[in-house]
Amino acid sequence: MSESGGTLRGVTRDRIAFVCSACGQRLSQWTGRCPGCAAWGTVDETTGVEVGGGRDHVRPVTLHAGEDEPRIRTAVPGMDRVLGGGLVPGSVVMLAGPPGIGKSTLVLHLLGALAAGGTGCLLVSGEESRAQVASRARRLRIAVDDVGFAPGRDLDVVLSAARAMRPAVLAVDSIQTVRDPEATAMPGGVTQVRLCADALVGLAKSEGITVILTGHVTKHGDLAGPRALEHAVDVVLAFEGDARSGLRVLSSGKNRFGAEGETAWFEMRPHGLARIDPTAMLVPGESAPGSAVAVVQAGRRALAIEVQALVSVEGTGRRQATGLDPRRFQLVAAVLDRAAALPLGRADLFGASSGGIRIDDPASDLAVAAALDRAAALPLGRADLFGASSGGIRIDDPASDLAVAAALASAATGSMPPSGAAFVGEISLTGSLRPAPGMQQRLAAARGAGCSAVFAPGPVEAPPAGLTVHTVTHVTQALGWAIPGAAKTRRARAS
């Protein structure tokens, strides 16, 4: 074939482009300030390579529901369920969490368990040396003799080590420490993280290697790095907990191969992570004024957890919560100003959605304080209100409203809820109760936690043996039955 008179397929030509070294955004012309990240002086000229000429010929294939590719079982209790049945070959899993929470420990447990079962594993660490990793493994009593190790902060070293060993599972700890030597951006920056993640995703898809990346989160709980990182990976796992306690929660925020919101609970012990039943830690055996048991939904699992409240009548009207969004407390103060006619200063206007629609504020249940002051007539207007969940766990289930209402009423009156009682139900701003989804699972979880009674809006069908369900429709009815002091306070204020 003659090569004259046309452009051959595969011939390349240079293309001028401009790239921001801070965020990686590509621009068609130079500008002093990047429109993507608003940084000054970060846009530089670069020469890209563009392929011209012919086109590749791709033969489309049909999709059919064949057999799924066998998954890699992790042998780590609870992790397979969170992953949706195990690791999918060729997938990319992001394990995100705050520094010091135990991500490296969890990865070491995972690789040790996989290697013990005959799965080839490679750990590339940019944070610890081989001696440090081995020392940690000895302390945690994890057998890692069959786990490959490569120290590396250079992307080329990581890729070369993976292609040389060809493991079934590659763990990179962490993605923020890996750098592409061909990029001029700072290590750990948005551009470096994006480039390195793209290369590792390509490795996973082309070689069929399961890649596990650990990543840090910001102080707001978001994954550090470009937003595109979450879209590029197949699974995003969050590893959270209270750094002052040993409780840890592994949850799936994104999962292309399984259900989202699945959770597994661990406790950090001297010899590493141990799978636990969280009920024993989240529901203490003895109750006290200001506490109540909620039954919330965590993924497809129902969980009993204690919520606590403190009411200080000597205060100035502060609202403070642990793990709760302050905007919810502003809503409480605004409604209290109207309901109790208290001179709280400038008035703010707020709107609220019902039925759990777009509820992303942790523990949105504290809006029930407004319903308590209006409907149950509890003197919460000038009081300082404090709320917390047991173990510092973040609650985003609106069905925990009634439990928080009971805890607030108990704290305000000094009366305790009945022993063995749990509460389920969302409270509207008028005080009426809305039923919660997954009621049968919640009742089973309450019974499993040792509860003998549940206060919840109806209808409720076939409760478990040994569990009595008190059907309630309004917060005043529920508190009148469950918190005797609340009814007395309401009658006193009414008179």
Image: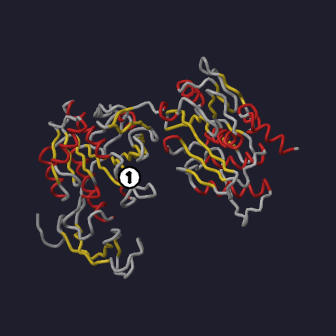
Residue beneath disc 1? 98
Q: Is residue 105 left or right of residue 252?
A: left
Pick whichever, 401 or 55, lies toward us. Answer: 401
- Identify residue type, mark 1: Pro
The residue drawn where x is 75% and y is 33% is 484
Q: Residue 336, located in which quarter of the rendered image?
A: bottom right
Q: How is the image coloured?
A: secondary structure
Q: Residues within 10 Å of mark 1 (few under 14, many from 20)?
A: many
Q: Residue 38, located in which quarter of the rendered image?
A: bottom left
Q: Quadrant of the C terminus?
A: top right
User: Residue 206: x and y, percent?
Assistant: 22, 48
User: Residue 173: x and y, percent?
Assistant: 26, 51
Pick whichever, 284 or 247, lies toward us. Answer: 284
User: Residue 434: x and y, percent?
Assistant: 69, 38
The residue drawn where x is 73% and y is 62% is 344
User: Residue 493: x and y, percent?
Assistant: 83, 45
Q: Residue 81, located in which quarter of the rendered image?
A: top left
Pick whichever, 176 or 158, lies toward us. Answer: 176
- View extreme (front): residue: 314
Q: Is residue 462 left or right of residue 82?
A: right
The residue drawn where x is 68% and y is 59% is 316
Find numbered disc 1 in the image and state the secondary structure of the residue it sits on: loop
Total marks placed: 1
Q: Please determine whether, in this image, residue 422 is positioned above or below residue 197.
A: above
Q: Quadrant of the N terminus?
A: bottom left
